[in-house]
Image (cartoon, grey):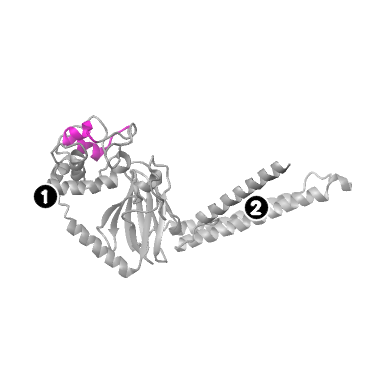
Amino acid sequence: MNHKLTWWARSSAATAALLCAGAAQAERQLNMSVPVTQAGQTMYDLHTLMLVICAVIFVAVFGVMFYSLYAHRKSVNKDVATFHENHLVEVIWTVIPFVILLVMAFPATQAIIAMRDTSNPDITIKVTGYQWKWGYDYLKGDGEGIRFVSNLATPQDQIFDRVGKGENYLLEVDNPLVVPVGKKVRILTTADDVIHAWYVPQLAVQQDATPGFIRDTWFKAEKVGTYRGQCAKLCGKDHAYMPIVVNVVSDADYKKWVDDQKKKMAAAGDNPDKTWTMAELMARGEKVYASNCAACHQANGQGLPPAFPALDGSKVVTGPAVGHAEIILNGRPGTTMAAFRQLSDVEIAAVVTYERNAWNTKTGDMMQPAEVKAQREGKAAAKPAAAPAS
């Protein structure tokens, strides 16, 4: 008996310790995220209203049921009812649910109509889903012409448990979406490969991004801050590595960001007609490879066979450069190798050059952006190599 008590005491202590540790490490949020848009507040209020209505119905129905079981129990010799029909009761239990449904449907319909009204936006941004990143194009308003790709910024060492997890593990990106506070932002969603979904809970935005289609939604953030979300579709092996970060800033900070972005774009000077040196292409290619290829093929080019073959010394890397570029442009059907047409001609030329001259592979050749441009436009014959590349 004492052994049993000791075992129970130890088990209880261990359970309590685990619960305390979990409480210390995680925020136990039971309700929806605190909204920062009017649409989000409307959804939050609707959620609360529906919860209250359901709770009242639950209490009423089960209250009547338990009362009936108690008051009409056999032990008190309660006479069994003999009636079979009661038209008044039937009318009541038909009309009351109908009225309840109307009470619930009216505000919900109003909210849905308001959430679908994308007219008169201050800023329009096209969001394109790729495996596994987001592309942003500012189409209207301040910032028109700005274009960039947003990749996961969480280090590989954290993902593979070589170091501790950061505060925003798997929810941080290299290029966040930046919008001004108090402005209506229209989001146009599409995808380049499979179905994705652009989802930011605190902005009350979730919209599918479907290849070949343009969907739209909108939000107007009323509070400066950083808001995080993720792709809400099971879009492939790196679905969990496709975060969304939206920085809502003041008008002054937004204008400064727009100016800085345009200066960076002008300074980058990604002219596909320029003849680049090997050093320039290698430096640029290393960055492109780290952002787009290293997750599958690894930083050392050794890959994760058999799903992700090694690039170092592969037939793709040592074969014709035009075939190498073709795989990057159009992907490999039937494999996990996705198309990377969203990369610029300079970026593709740079990553091809880098992969052909990094690690133990030293082909000594390079590819110019003008060659990629011609290949993209169908002016160069492309001969795909024998194996997937990044």
Asked if residue 112 lies left or right of residue 322, the reply is right
Label 1 sits on residue: 274
> Is 226 left, or right, of 367 in this rendering?
right
Q: With respect to residue 366, does 48 lie above or below? A: below
Give the residue type that dot 1 points to. Answer: Lys
At mark 1, the secondary structure is loop
Residue in view at x 28 percent, y 64 percent? 257
Residue beneath disc 2:
97
Q: Residue furthest front?
A: 2
**Pick the front one: 281 or 346:** 281
User: Residue drawn at (60%, 51%), measured in percent from left and top?
Assistant: 16
What percent of the width, then of the height, locates residue 219?
Answer: 40, 60
Q: Which of 148 and 389 is in front in this view?
A: 389
Considering the image in quadrants, where does the N terminus appear?
A: top right
Residue at the (22%, 46%) spot, across then down: 286
Taking 383 as reference, is 45 above or below it? below
Q: Which residue lies furthest to the bottom in this view?
A: 252
Q: Where is residue 7 in the image (x, y as percent from the top left)?
A: 66, 43
Magenta region: which residues?
Answer: 312-334
Q: In which quarter of the image is the C terminus?
A: top left
State left or right for residue 200 relative to residue 145: right
Q: In which quarter of the image is residue 381?
A: top left
Q: What element carries label 2?
A: helix
Q: Is residue 79 visible?
A: no
